[in-house]
Image (tube, grey):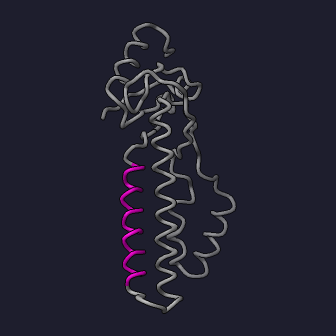
Amino acid sequence: MAAVSVFVDDAIRGRLPLVCAKTGEPADLVVRVRHPVGGGAASMAWLLLFLGPPGWAAFFLVAILAPGQEYLTVRIPETDASYNREKRLERSRIAVFGMGLALVLYGIIFQGMFPALWLVSGAACLVAALVLHFKVTQQNIGISLDASRRWVTLSGVHPSFVHAVQLQEVGGTTRF
């Protein structure tokens, strides 16, 4: 997979070439992706809790007065098949995780026949949910904003998408 930097306005408004960023095929749709950017002032404030009551008061002030997490919403071209595959994987992950929790709880609460079987089955489902979680996050496109806040870097994109973006920039449709 590759990475490409685009002007922030093009990413936000969806003025990217209609090539799927995940597969490199012609895109059927444009998907809005909301991604956290920046640290947020309260991210390190949890360390104040170790300072006792004065730290707790400082943490309370930081939690109230500090700005929250900032998000960037970009529009990324994608094929319908790729989008459906990603949603199907996400639903499977949630279903397997829920089934794993239910089996573990059943094995703990109801001490009926073969409680170890329920616990082992539940643990296997939870491991499968973890594997699906890594597959889902591996398919996600990384979005980062540079320090000047003018350029968005899209990482984990298909090389054909990078080529199409470079052709679009040469064609003059990207504004600098």
Q: Position of residue 131 (x, y in %)?
A: 36, 59
From which residue to which does the magenta span run? Answer: 117-137
The residue lying toward the viewer, choosing from 105 and 169, is: 105
**Most common secondary structure along the magenta stretch:** helix
Q: Position of residue 57 (x, y in %)?
A: 65, 74
Inspect the magenta stretch and tell me whether residue 123 lies in it: yes
Question: Where 130 falls versus 146 (above or below)?
Answer: below
Question: Where 131 falls versus 19 (above or below)?
Answer: below
- Residue at point 51%, 81% (across, down): 105
Residue that sits furthest to the right in the current view: 64
The residue lying toward the viewer, choosing from 122 and 21, is: 122
Question: Where 166 falls versus 31 (above or below)?
Answer: above
Q: Position of residue 96 (x, y in %)?
A: 46, 63
- Residue at point 39%, 24% (across, down): 25
Residue that sits furthest to the front in the current view: 113
Residue 132 lies in what quarter of the image? bottom left
Question: Where 106 falls versus 94 (above or below)?
Answer: below
Q: Position of residue 125 (x, y in %)?
A: 41, 68
- Residue at point 47%, 55% (across, down): 92
The residue lying toward the viewer, choosing from 36 and 45, is: 36
